[in-house]
């Protein structure tokens, strides 16, 4: 499949070796200890993503889940964040993942927080951004 990555594959079958970080680690961990601070799912894999010339690497490095105040809090660390195209797609994906985890843990989804190391827009997106900003609510 080349150099491309898929967040779903990395969450539910990391490295194609059957490591299901969500169903076999995260959910059992938080069921056993809802106060755990170790509820992490990792998408960035040094063994395959730190090659010097590799360009297709996950922008979302990891997501952390915590249960606080009887809600699922979700924090995403984003290495490189294209705010116009990438961020909205990432938020939809993470929201679906949070809803799945919340359902399995029988807790509602609470806040979703993103921490972006490099948040940016590209010059080639300026015209599209102007169109979106210029639209009136319907």
Image (cartoon, rainbow, N blue to C red):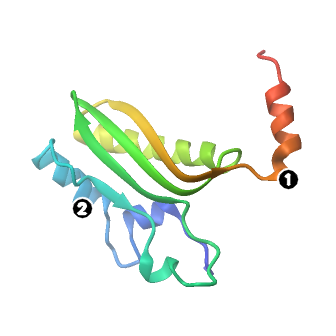
- Mark 2 Cα-neighbour bin, 10 Å: few <14, some 14–19, many ≥20: few
Q: 55 or 18: nearer the eye?
A: 55
Q: Quadrant of residue 129?
A: top right
Which residue is at a point 10% across and 48% down the rendered structure image?
Answer: 32
Q: Residue furthest top?
A: 138
First of labels 2, 1 by sequence position: 2
User: In the image, is 78 to the left or to the right of 126?
Assistant: left
User: In the image, is 110 to the left or to the right of 25?
Assistant: right
Q: Secondary structure at mark 1?
A: helix
Disc number at residue 24?
2
Which residue is at a point 25% across and 55% down the rendered structure image?
Answer: 26
Q: Residue furthest left?
A: 32
User: In the image, is 69 to the left or to the right of 57?
Assistant: left
Q: Quadrant of residue 127?
A: top right
Disc number at residue 84?
none
Q: Is residue 19 above or below residue 130?
A: below
Q: 101 or 74: nearer the eye?
A: 74
Whole-number angstrom distance, CA of label 2 to CA of label 1: 42 Å
**Residue holding disc 1:** 124
Q: Quadrant of the C terminus?
A: top right
Q: Quadrant of the N terminus?
A: bottom right
User: In the image, is 138 to the left or to the right of 41?
Assistant: right
Q: Position of residue 84 (x, y in %)?
A: 71, 44
Which residue is at a point 39% across and 71% down the rendered structure image?
Answer: 14
């Amino acid at each position: 499949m080349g150099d491309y990555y898929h967040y779903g594959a990395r969450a539910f079958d990391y490295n194609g070796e059957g490591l299901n970080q969500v169903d076999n680690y995260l959910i059992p961990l938080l069921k056993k200890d809802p106060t755990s601070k170790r509820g992490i799912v990792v998408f960035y894999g040094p063994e395959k993503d730190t090659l010097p010339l590799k360009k297709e690497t996950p922008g979302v490095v990891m997501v952390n889940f915590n249960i606080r105040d009887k809600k699922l809090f979700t924090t995403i660390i984003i290495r490189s964040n294209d705010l116009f195209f990438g961020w909205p797609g990432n938020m939809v994906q993470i929201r679906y993942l949070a809803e799945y985890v919340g359902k399995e843990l029988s807790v509602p989804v609470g806040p979703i927080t993103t921490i972006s190391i490099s948040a940016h827009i590209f010059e080639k997106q300026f015209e599209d951004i102007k169109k979106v900003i210029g639209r009136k609510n319907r």
